[in-house]
C-alpha cells in the first residue's frame, strides 16, 4: 500500500515538473496598420488613389460611395487630353447621353481648400456646379491628366486625393475618341473598390509612405 502511494506521489511530482518545463509561446507580433485606398478598374487598366486625410469630408464621402458600389457601372463621361478625365455620375448608367454630367446624390460637400494640395499631374478633384461657396458635387470627380498640372483650378475646386499608380491609364483614357461634348464614343466603364494596404505594401507597391 505504501509503495502504491509513493508511486502515485512520484508520478504527480513528475507531471508538475513537466508542466514547469513547458515554455510559454512567444506573443504574436502586432498586426501592421492598414490604410484604405481606392481602386478604379477599367478595360484600359487599373488606377489606385490615395485620399487625403486633410480633406476629411470628401474622403469620408468618397469611401462611403465606393464601399456601397455607387460608382460601379458608371463611365468617364468627359475626357480632355492634357486636362482631365471626369466621372462619377450615376446618369451615365442609362442610355441617354444628353443627361451625362447632371447627376449625383442630392447633396453637396463644403469646399475643403488646403494650400499644400494642388492640381498636380494625377490629382483627384471634386467637380462642381457654379456656386458662390464652391461646394463640391456629391459624387462627380476628375483626375488631372496634364503632365504639367492644371494649377488654374487651384482654390477653385477641391483636391482630395492623388494617383498612387495608373497615371498612364488616366492619360490613355484622355486620348480616346470622343464627340463634340467631350464624351467618349465608346463607354469607359469603371468598377470602384475600397482596398486595404499595409504600410509595407504601400511602400513596396507604390513607393508611397503616408
Image (cartoon, rainbow, N blue to C red):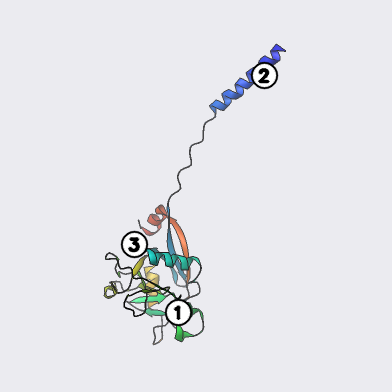
Instruction: Tell me how far mark 2 sits from mark 3, CA to CA.
Output: 70 Å
Considering depth in this image, is 36 or 58 the residue closer to the camera? 58
Residue found 63% across the figure and 18% down from its top: 10
Query: What residue is disc 2 on?
Result: 8
User: Which quadrant of the rendered structure holds the C terminus?
Assistant: bottom left
Residue contact between numbered discs 2 and 3, judged by CB atoms under 8 Å: no
Quarter occupied by residue 50: bottom left
Residue visible at 48% across and 42% down in the picture? 28
The residue under label 1 is: 103
Query: Looking at the picture, how far across and down is residue 42, in whole percent?
Result: 46, 71
Q: Residue visible at 39% across and 55% down?
A: 204
The answer to whether any part of residue 174 appears in the image is yes
Could you give the CA–CA distance between mark 2 and mark 1, rounded to whole angstroms? 83 Å
Q: Secondary structure at mark 3?
A: loop
Separation of residues labelled 3 and 1 (CA atoms): 26 Å
Residue 54 numbered tag? 3
Circle 2: is it few (<14), some (14-19), or many (20+) Cα within 10 Å? few
Q: Taking 209 as reference, is 182 above or below it?
A: below
Amino acid at each position: 500500500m505504501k509503495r502504491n502511494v509513493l508511486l502515485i506521489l512520484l508520478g504527480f511530482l513528475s507531471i508538475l515538473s513537466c508542466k514547469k518545463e513547458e515554455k510559454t509561446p512567444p506573443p504574436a507580433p502586432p498586426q501592421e496598420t492598414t490604410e484604405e485606398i481606392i481602386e478604379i478598374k477599367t478595360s484600359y487598366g487599373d488606377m489606385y488613389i490615395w485620399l487625403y486625410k486633410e480633406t476629411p469630408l470628401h474622403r469620408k464621402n468618397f469611401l462611403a460611395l465606393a464601399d456601397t458600389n455607387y460608382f460601379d457601372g458608371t463611365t468617364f463621361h468627359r475626357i480632355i487630353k492634357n486636362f482631365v478625365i471626369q466621372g462619377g455620375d450615376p446618369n451615365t448608367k442609362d442610355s441617354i447621353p444628353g443627361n451625362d454630367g447632371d447627376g449625383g446624390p442630392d447633396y453637396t460637400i463644403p469646399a475643403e481648400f488646403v494650400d499644400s494640395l494642388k492640381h498636380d499631374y494625377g490629382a483627384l478633384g471634386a467637380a462642381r456646379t457654379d456656386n458662390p461657396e464652391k461646394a463640391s458635387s456629391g459624387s462627380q470627380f476628375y483626375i488631372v491628366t496634364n503632365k504639367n498640372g492644371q494649377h488654374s483650378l487651384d482654390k477653385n475646386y477641391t483636391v482630395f486625393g492623388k494617383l498612387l499608380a495608373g497615371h498612364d491609364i488616366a492619360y490613355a483614357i484622355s486620348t480616346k475618341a470622343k464627340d463634340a461634348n467631350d464624351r467618349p464614343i465608346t463607354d469607359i466603364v469603371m468598377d470602384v473598390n475600397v482596398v486595404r494596404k499595409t504600410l509595407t505594401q504601400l511602400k513596396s507597391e507604390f513607393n508611397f509612405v503616408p
